[in-house]
Image (tube, grey):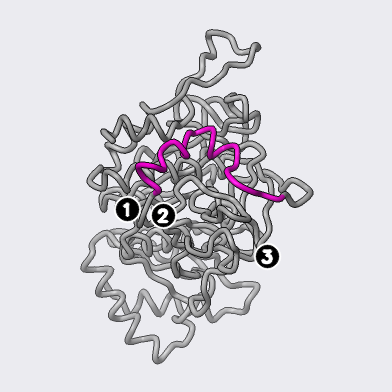
């Protein structure tokens, strides 16, 4: 492959005036050797062409990410590369409930999944959880001992500070540990590695998620929490999710908030993930939650109070919130049984559930599959 010619073509697209500049694409190499050879040439040419500084790379996905003016011009390399447009991806929380909440003690969702009954056996001690989200509030009293350094993919020179709130909310449900004045999460001694892939508006691209998963694999996290999704399938995202799974990482993903019965969002729809739907205080599926055969397990996700930016607390709803309960429950299990594989954990999670309550309007034809996660049952099923 003519790597010099290939990179020159990318440069030409980047040097066009701003309105004409191409969309971003994920360019995946068929063979590891080709990817490595391209990186060597990219490194050499960067001294000459400053625009190549915009090109990012993921070793795990064997991909480079770059603006491309005319992707069809790359067709001459079609035997060596696949080209996929970099599309946007959304967080799975419904609108923030209007007024801030105060939180003290153990939130209802943490109690409902029976996490406190496990704490005499496991608190998730030292389990590393990569939360790919908007970052985290490093000054929050609830999270003082719960946050590792993580990574800010939007600005690598900064800590992954949360300028939205969603990531802090997820981190609080998983690992808050402020028994005196704040709240306690599902696995209060687990460690959150915030991976900031989403901006202050809660927007990200598939490439940010790919780079986030790449970082999590390299830093050997045990669990990745993915409280976001998209409607379309991405080969690049599937590829990198599969590699993380093969590396022994448990991936927990939210199913989406469209109230659908036969469909859920990606990446939750990929079989390598544990897909999560949301329940309310009555153990009924929340009206907004996607449901059906593709959902592996349900967890509390309606009117969940958790940590928020500027040291506050807020109530939010969404399958995002449900996912953080499941990540926390798995952290409790893994701290006690560190040798379990992602496949074994998925089987245990689907088995260790409490039946859901069915709304009167539900007919037997629409019988609900799956149940709500139970951290105590999960520990018992795991042999602890």
Q: Determine the CA span between mark 2 and mark 1.
A: 20 Å
> Which residue was labeled with disc 3?
310
Local secondary structure at mark 2: loop
> How many discs mark residues in the rendered view?
3
**Circle nearer the N terminus (1, 3):** 1
Residue 243 pos. (x, y %): 29, 53
Q: Which residues are magenta?
A: 102-123
| Residue depicted at x 39% and y 58% | 213
Judging depth in this view, the residue of 116 and 209 nearest the camera is 116
Judging depth in this view, the residue of 43 and 92 nearest the camera is 92
Horizontal side, residue 321 vs residue 40: left or right:
right
Local secondary structure at mark 3: helix
Judging depth in this view, the residue of 77 and 221 nearest the camera is 221
> Which residue was labeled with disc 1?
244
| Residue depicted at x 53% and y 9% | 365
User: Residue 337's quadrant in the figure?
Assistant: top left
Q: Is residue 304 visible?
A: yes
Residue 342 pos. (x, y %): 30, 42
Look at the numbered discs 3 and 2 and tell me whether their residues touch, using CB distance below 8 Å: no
Residue 246 pos. (x, y %): 26, 49
User: Residue 48's quadrant in the figure?
Assistant: bottom left
**Circle nearer the N terminus (3, 2):** 2
> Which residue was labeled with disc 2?
190
Q: Determine the CA span between mark 3 and mark 2.
A: 22 Å
Per the picture, the main secondary structure of the magenta-coloured stretch is loop
Judging depth in this view, the residue of 3 and 352 nearest the camera is 352
304 in magenta:
no
């Amino acid at each position: 492959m003519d790597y010099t010619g290939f990179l020159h073509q990318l440069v030409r697209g980047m040097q066009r005036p701003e309105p004409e500049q191409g969309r971003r694409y994920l360019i995946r190499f068929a063979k590891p050797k080709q990817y490595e050879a391209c990186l060597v040439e990219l490194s050499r040419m960067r001294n000459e062409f400053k625009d190549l500084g915009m090109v990012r790379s993921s070793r795990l996905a064997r991909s480079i990410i770059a603006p491309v003016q005319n992707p069809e011009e790359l067709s001459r390399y079609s035997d060596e590369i696949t080209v996929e447009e970099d599309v946007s991806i959304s967080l799975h929380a419904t609108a923030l409930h209007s007024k801030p909440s105060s939180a003290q003690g153990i939130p209802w969702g943490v109690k409902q999944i029976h996490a406190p009954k496990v704490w005499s056996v496991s608190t998730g001690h030292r389990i590393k959880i990569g939360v790919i989200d908007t970052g985290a509030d490093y000054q929050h009293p609830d999270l003082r001992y719960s946050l590792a350094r993580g990574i800010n993919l939007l600005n690598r020179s900064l800590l992954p500070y949360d300028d939205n709130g969603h990531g802090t909310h997820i981190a609080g449900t998983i690992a808050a540990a402020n028994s005196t004045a704040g709240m306690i999460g599902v696995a209060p001694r687990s460690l959150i590695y915030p991976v900031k892939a989403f901006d202050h508006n809660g927007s990200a691209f598939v490439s940010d998620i790919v780079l986030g998963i790449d970082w999590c694999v390299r830093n050997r996290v045990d669990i990745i929490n993915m409280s976001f999704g998209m409607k379309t399938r991405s080969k690049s995202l599937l590829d990198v999710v599969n590699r993380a799974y093969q590396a022994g990482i448990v991936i927990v993903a939210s199913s989406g908030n469209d109230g659908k019965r036969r469909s859920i969002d990606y990446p939750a729809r990929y079989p390598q993930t544990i897909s999560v739907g949301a329940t309310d205080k009555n153990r009924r599926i929340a009206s907004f939650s996607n449901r059906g055969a593709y959902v592996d397990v349900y967890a509390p996700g309606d009117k969940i109070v958790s940590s928020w930016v500027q040291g506050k607390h807020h109530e939010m709803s969404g399958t995002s919130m449900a996912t953080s309960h499941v990540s926390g429950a798995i952290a409790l299990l893994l701290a006690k049984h560190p040798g379990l594989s992602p496949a074994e954990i998925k089987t245990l999670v689907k088995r260790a559930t409490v039946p859901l309550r069915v709304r009167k309007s539900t007919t037997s034809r629409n019988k609900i599959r799956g149940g709500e996660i139970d951290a105590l049952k999960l520990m018992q099923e795991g042999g602890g």
